[in-house]
Image (cartoon, grey):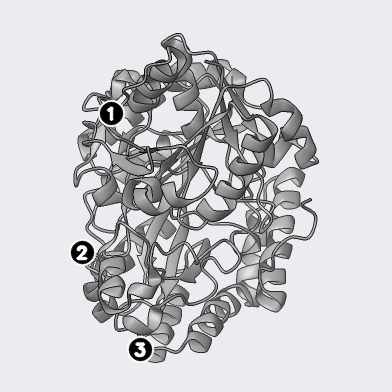
Amino acid sequence: MKTLMLIPPSKFAKNVARDLIYGCWCKGKRIGGIKFPPVSQLIVVTYLRKHGIPADLLDAASTLKHINELYDIIKKYRSVIMLTSTMTVNEDALLLNDLKRVNPELKTIVYGSHPTFMPLYTLEKKGIDFVIQREPERVALDLIKALSTGEKDIKNIKGIGFVQKNRVVITPPAPLIEDLDELPIPDRSLLPKNIDYYNPIVKKLPYTTMITSRGCPGRCTFCSVPFFYGNKIRWMSVKRVMDEIDQIVRMGYKEIFFRDEMFTASRKRVMEICERIIKKNYKLKWIASTRADMINEEMLKIMKQAGCHMIRVGVESGSQKVLNNIKKGTRLEQVETLFRLTNKLKIDTHAHLMVGMTGETKEDVEKTIKLILKIKPTIITAGVCTPYPGTDLFKVVAGKDPSIKDGSKSDLAGLHTEAFYNEYFSKMTKEEISRSVKRIYRKFYFRLSYIIKWLFKLSSVDELRRVTIAATKVLDFIFRGDKPREDVD
């Protein structure tokens, strides 16, 4: 059964970071227009191909100029699979329904956070035939094989949902992939040619993304990762990681953006990967994510030596009270220590912040502003804390107000910029929350000292171009907001 992995366009934004399986995606000008290559989806495609399923990847969001092109392409396929999430599932279902009208024999399959945590709601949406819960690789293979052979009784396949004789069938969960080395190195030759996945924070082009682990040891109330991945973290072996890095280097990539939820969760593993990169004398640059309590100076030094030029940190708030409320598990002193070390070692930082969290007040937002001005990250992003299915926060809201249903009314139009049921856990009004996001951006980016510092950091004309584009988008967001795009037919 010829299968298409589809990355669809959105009417709400030209750029949607639709590569993380558990869902809480970002988009638009607020993140400087960043785009990521769909490498996580490519893993699924490569896995299917490895097991004999003819599968292709189409990044329609980056390559197609008009939706009619997709209608012509879809006629060649018998099944289409799509990564979806709470904020896109309604839009995605509408598109899939259109594709089924063009190709009546088409079977549509969705996976991701929303199908995992809200399978019943997902299957109610016209256009969706099957849902896959949690990890998609093995389950998608079993499902597509069954559909290819005309197998009528698919209830034996674990980890799926579908409608049969007007009844919803949800099968028992499929086991997680314990040995991530089972996942193939994604075939990056299948990515669209001549597409520049714009990213202002990378140092060298071309760049690619890479995943070396799944899960996070954190238990933050706003995050679905612990529940999606079974409250544990799994790693690829160092050998498997290096095999993929070796291939990336041979293909001519000069930078890797690691998309692991928590790259530094295993100190021993990080040290060994860095030592091997150094031994091979690769001139790679790379970016990775960490927590303030899961990294130290020794790790930072060897990471920099191995090519790491930026780390991303979920700072979230400058109020210890708020951090405790969301069960972040970090202390402000740890945050300050980490940024003091990165500034000393000249490693760039990306601080992620949120507004409208549990128990948060306007005074707490001012503490956040005070903190970021003190710790001096290289860049920041800030967004509204939103209750998504699969999180403790969503359970709290749903228990107080069932009208939230599956949460899918929080679509990309107001994603991370507008309050959504925050009145049930935050002590700020909707207007105060939205204003606070822009206030954080203004207070951080509208500083002459910050602008001058950036001018001295730029090392090439290409970097100047990318940073200028990002700055323009962020400024546009501060003054005009992140309105839906008007160029999608």
Return the residue nearer the eye: 442 or 278.
Answer: 442
- In front of the other: label 2 or label 3? 3
Q: Does residue 136 sit above or below 308 in this rendering?
A: above
Q: CA gap, disc 2 to disc 3?
A: 21 Å
Residue lying at the far top in this picture: please name it. Answer: 52
Label 3 belongs to which residue?
Answer: 427
Residue 296 in sight in this render: no
Residue 77 in sight in this render: yes
Label 1 belongs to which residue?
Answer: 155
Residue lying at the far front in this picture: please name it. Answer: 165
Q: Give the percent coordinates (x, y) of residue 8.
A: 63, 42
Q: Does residue 336 sit above or below 434 in this rendering?
A: above
Sequence-wise, which precedes: disc 1 or disc 3? 1
Question: Which residue is painted at 80% across and 40% down in the image?
Answer: 65
Secondary structure beneath dot 1 equals loop
Q: Give the percent coordinates (x, y) of residue 62.
A: 70, 39
Three-letter code for the amino acid on which mark 1 is drawn: Lys
